[in-house]
Amino acid sequence: MFSGQQVRLRRLEPSVLSRFGIVLLLGTGATLAQSVLRIVVVEGDGAINNVRTRTTHAPVVEVRNEQNDVVQGASVTFQAPSDGASADFGEGTRTFVTQTDAEGRAAAHGLRPNSVTGPYEIRITASFRSQSASAVITQTNAAPADAKSSRKIWLIGLAVGAVAGGAFAASHGGRSSNNTPSQTTTGGIVPGSPSFGPPH
């Protein structure tokens, strides 16, 4: 009777092995059939946005498959943070959905930074025929430094002072001598004329 059980087990072994073989084969086939997407960041990563003028650099990505071929018609979603330093895609919308073009590229047009300064991340997801991929773009919201604005005002004041001083020197020189006809100089300094400097 013990030998009969051994025979029965031996007869079942090929069947069990064949079932395992089918499962392994199907599993391998599913892995080979699955394609892996990849997102390549083309523009916008590391960009610094001006919060005063609301100007920014629109992120642009490219979707490729495991053969490194571009994927047309892939759905791409750009997601900006809901609070803190961030940006919107128009009317306060923090999500932008589009599709890749014939070159496999997708751009988030209309991106505008909010008034909060600091770095933030734009999360990107792409999907195509049940495959998906994700990536992150980092941008920074910043305001122009006040020192630059002060220097600009100072330069404007210096230019105005120079023009006023030149007008005064020209009119004063014209009255200094009745016998000498007045001359207008352009692009030069007449000897003896007062020197120009920044306003005090």
Image (cartoon, rainbow, N blue to C red):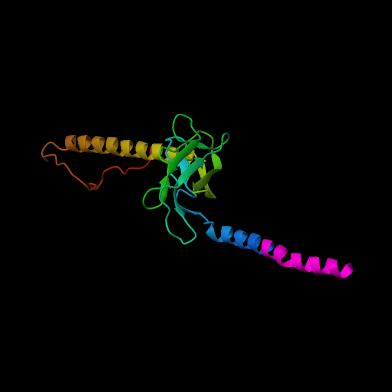
Q: Position of residue 24 (x, y in %)?
A: 65, 62
Q: Residue at x 71, y 67 (%)?
A: 14
Residue in the foreground of this view, choosing between 160 and 168 = 160
Tell me, yes or no, if residue 162 can be seen here: yes
Residue 185 covered by magenta stretch: no
Q: How many marks?
A: 0
Task: Classify 162 as above or below 105.
Answer: above
Task: Classify 25 as above or below 125.
Answer: below
For the C terminus, give its image quadrant.
top left
Q: Position of residue 112 (x, y in %)?
A: 45, 36
Q: Residue at x 55, y 41 (%)?
A: 118
Residue 13 covered by magenta stretch: yes
Q: Position of residue 159 (x, y in %)?
A: 32, 39
For the N terminus, give its image quadrant.
bottom right
Q: Which SS does the magenta portion mostly show?
A: helix
Residue in the foreground of this view, choosing between 195 and 115 = 115
Whether residue 190 sits left or right of residue 108 in the image: it is: left
Whether residue 40 sits left or right of residue 27 in the image: it is: left
Q: Quadrant of residue 8?
A: bottom right
Whether residue 6 sits left or right of residue 53 in the image: it is: right
Give the magenta range.
1-19
Whether residue 97 sits left or right of residue 19 in the image: it is: left
Give the farthest residue toward the right.
1
Tell me, yes or no, if residue 42 can be seen here: no
Residue in the foreground of this view, choosing between 194 and 130 = 130
Q: Position of residue 131 (x, y in %)?
A: 53, 50
